[in-house]
């Protein structure tokens, strides 16, 4: 790794990627989106606007299940957008939830709300005539979709820890403040979607005229829970609590999971610890980690544009020193902390303020009514009577938070009647996760959300076979190597390679601090299950006390431990 600025170029030379051109020519993210919205001949956007709408929280998609059928009918694909909201820390009021759920029911193609691993919600299937109305509907209840996609800082994640009531409120407030501080300053969103007054932006002091080289993700977490999977993110503030008081953060930089099949210059990477800073430096550190990545990130090759590649190119020490110089601070030595878990706590937990918190399991984060589990109706009924708030988790679940003791029985009854509390949900299902993938994601190579339930049921059969029905492996399925389900921090990570085929990665750990290694490539679910059958059997018979599946595979040499991703992930 480079030890000084002379050892590696701070700026990558070469022709800039075309995304840099379109951002520069976009007039601060306006482009011609407003004109495109008036064009009802097509359901889609022009090539440049196709990219620019992402900065406003939207992705152009179509229903891939019927793409071929529509082509035979000489129709364009059934184009729509996925619209993702900005909900820093995942906290929503019941009133906001009711408005969101009602809008999804009446104005989206699928009628469902999707909770995401970015601790927010998405509408899938919004058609062009409804786009502006959708933005205005969420804005009416105090929400927006600014900077939830595109080359900007995305929705800021925050621990959902339901126990430490006062500390949760404090770390959530910091997630909100960081989100606001790193937002684009352009008024394009308000002008285009909310009929705001036109005010030509002349500068973007944090993000710059051409914004960031690539997407940027930030978390605020509170040990011992790593439910935000901090190593999947560019910038992480790990709360340090002393004598019950939040005193500051250990700052970790350079995590990221996306890669490209067949390109060994891309890889998942865990974050590096830069050191400790007290609370008063939080926003300055956040801003200047972003500005260093803004100025030094790779704008030539978007596949190598994330912060993790910048650190590996220039050196973590060089990056850290530049953040210190710009922020006018010096990182102190990191203070001790430990993560012991990363899953959500299900069922009732009493907070330190005396109120109760109920975490409901939402399979794949998909909020809809299904036979035997009318969870959408249940959440609506709870929102109508709940006096606290909702917390969306980074694991696609939902916490009904701040329930007074007098209301606990009512919430419990509604939750059980509608499948939000279900004692038959196994530990394995609770510790499994999938991205959306087919039919809406244009990048999907293999099934994920629709594949997960059946596959997990087969894994559960293996656990029963080997005598551990109440145990689990951390299982993640991703339809492509972009990693939205964080498969590259799982004990068992499946990454889509093609229809019905996956790469099988093994050897992550239960607390999310290790990248798994490729074990078998381009194999079917049947082959994966056969491999897991053998390996789970070996784990049960040979594990040490409390040893997780991934740790067992590393200790026994089934897969090699990934320690420095740029050199040993592909080795």
Image (tube, helix red, strand yellow):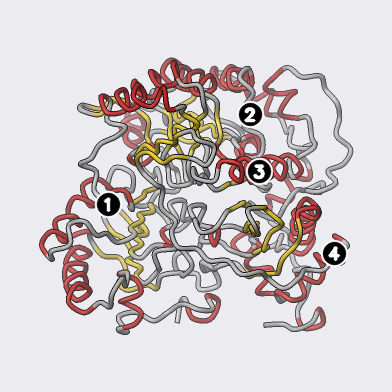
Give the residue displayed 56% in from the left and 61% down from the top: 256
Q: Which mark is residue 427?
A: 1
Give the residue displayed 55% in from the left and 68% down from the top: 270
From this view, report whether residue 427 is shown above or below residue 120. below
Give the residue displayed 58% in from the left and 44% down from the top: 168
Is tag 3's residue or tag 4's residue first in the polypeptide sequence? 3
Label 1, label 3: how far apart the Cα atoms are: 30 Å
| Residue at image mark 4 | 329
**Residue 47 appears in the picture as rendered:** no
Give the SS element for disc 1: helix
Is tag 2's residue or tag 4's residue first in the polypeptide sequence? 2
| Residue at image mark 2 | 144
Q: Are marks 1 and 4 in contact (CB under 8 Å)?
A: no
How packed mark 2 is, by other alpha carbons closer than 10 Å (few <14, some 14-19, many 20 or more), is many
How packed mark 4 is, by other alpha carbons closer than 10 Å (few <14, some 14-19, many 20 or more), is some
From this view, report whether residue 549 is shown above or below residue 484. below
């Amino acid at each position: 790794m480079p030890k000084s600025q002379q050892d590696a170029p701070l700026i990558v030379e070469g022709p800039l990627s075309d995304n840099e051109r379109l951002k520069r020519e976009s007039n601060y993210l306006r482009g011609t989106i407003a004109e495109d919205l008036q064009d009802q001949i097509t359901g889609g956007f022009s090539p440049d606007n196709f990219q620019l709408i992402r900065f406003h929280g939207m992705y152009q998609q179509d229903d891939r299940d019927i793409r071929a059928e529509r082509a035979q009918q000489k129709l364009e694909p059934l184009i729509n957008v996925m619209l993702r909201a900005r909900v820093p820390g995942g906290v929503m009021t019941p009133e906001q939830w009711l408005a969101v759920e009602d809008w999804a029911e009446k104005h989206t193609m699928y009628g469902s709300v999707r909770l995401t691993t970015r601790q927010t919600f998405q509408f899938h299937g919004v058609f062009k005539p409804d786009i502006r109305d959708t933005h205005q509907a969420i804005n009416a209840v105090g929400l927006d979709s600014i900077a939830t996609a595109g080359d900007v800082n995305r929705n800021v994640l925050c621990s959902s820890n339901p126990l430490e009531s006062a500390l949760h409120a404090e770390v959530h407030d910091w997630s909100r403040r960081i989100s606001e501080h790193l937002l684009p300053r352009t008024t394009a969103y308000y002008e285009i979607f909310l009929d705001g007054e036109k005010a030509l932006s002349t500068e973007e002091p944090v993000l710059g005229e051409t914004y960031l080289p690539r997407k940027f993700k930030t978390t605020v977490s509170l040990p011992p829970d790593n439910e935000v999977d901090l190593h999947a993110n560019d910038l992480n503030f790990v709360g340090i609590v002393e004598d019950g008081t939040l005193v500051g953060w250990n700052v970790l930089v350079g995590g990221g999971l996306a890669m490209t099949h067949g390109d060994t210059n891309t890889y998942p990477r865990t974050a590096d610890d830069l050191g400790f800073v007290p609370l008063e430096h939080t926003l300055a550190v956040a801003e200047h980690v972003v500005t260093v990545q803004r100025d030094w990130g790779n704008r030539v090759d978007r596949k190598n544009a994330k912060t993790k590649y910048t650190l590996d190119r220039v050196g973590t020490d060089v990056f850290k020193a530049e953040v210190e110089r710009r922020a006018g601070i010096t990182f102190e030595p990191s203070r001790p902390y430990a993560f012991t878990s990363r899953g959500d706590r299900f069922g009732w937990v009493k907070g330190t303020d005396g109120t109760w918190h109920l975490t409901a399991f939402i399979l794949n984060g998909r909020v809809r009514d299904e036979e035997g589990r009318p969870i959408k109706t249940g959440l609506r009924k709870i929102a109508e009577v709940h006096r606290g708030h909702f917390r969306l988790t980074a694991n696609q679940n939902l916490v009904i938070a701040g329930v007074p003791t007098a209301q606990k029985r009512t919430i419990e009854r509604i939750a059980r009647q509608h499948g939000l509390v279900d004692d038959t949900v196994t530990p394995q299902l609770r510790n499994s996760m999938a991205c959306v993938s087919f039919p809406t994601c244009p990048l999907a190579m293999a099934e994920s959300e629709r594949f997960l339930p059946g596959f997990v049921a087969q894994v559960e059969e293996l656990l029963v076979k080997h005598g551990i029905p109440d145990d689990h492996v951390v299982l993640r399925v991703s339809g492509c190597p972009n990693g939205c389900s964080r498969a590259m921090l799982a004990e068992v990570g499946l990454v889509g390679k093609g229809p019905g085929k996956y790469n099988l990665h093994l050897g992550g750990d239960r607390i999310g601090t290790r990248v798994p290694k490729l074990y078998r490539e381009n194999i079917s679910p049947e082959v994966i299950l056969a491999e897991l059958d053998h390996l789970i059997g070996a784990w049960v018979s040979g594990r040490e006390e409390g040893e997780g599946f991934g740790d067992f595979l590393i200790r026994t040499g089934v897969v090699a431990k990934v320690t420095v991703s740029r050199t040993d992930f592909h080795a």
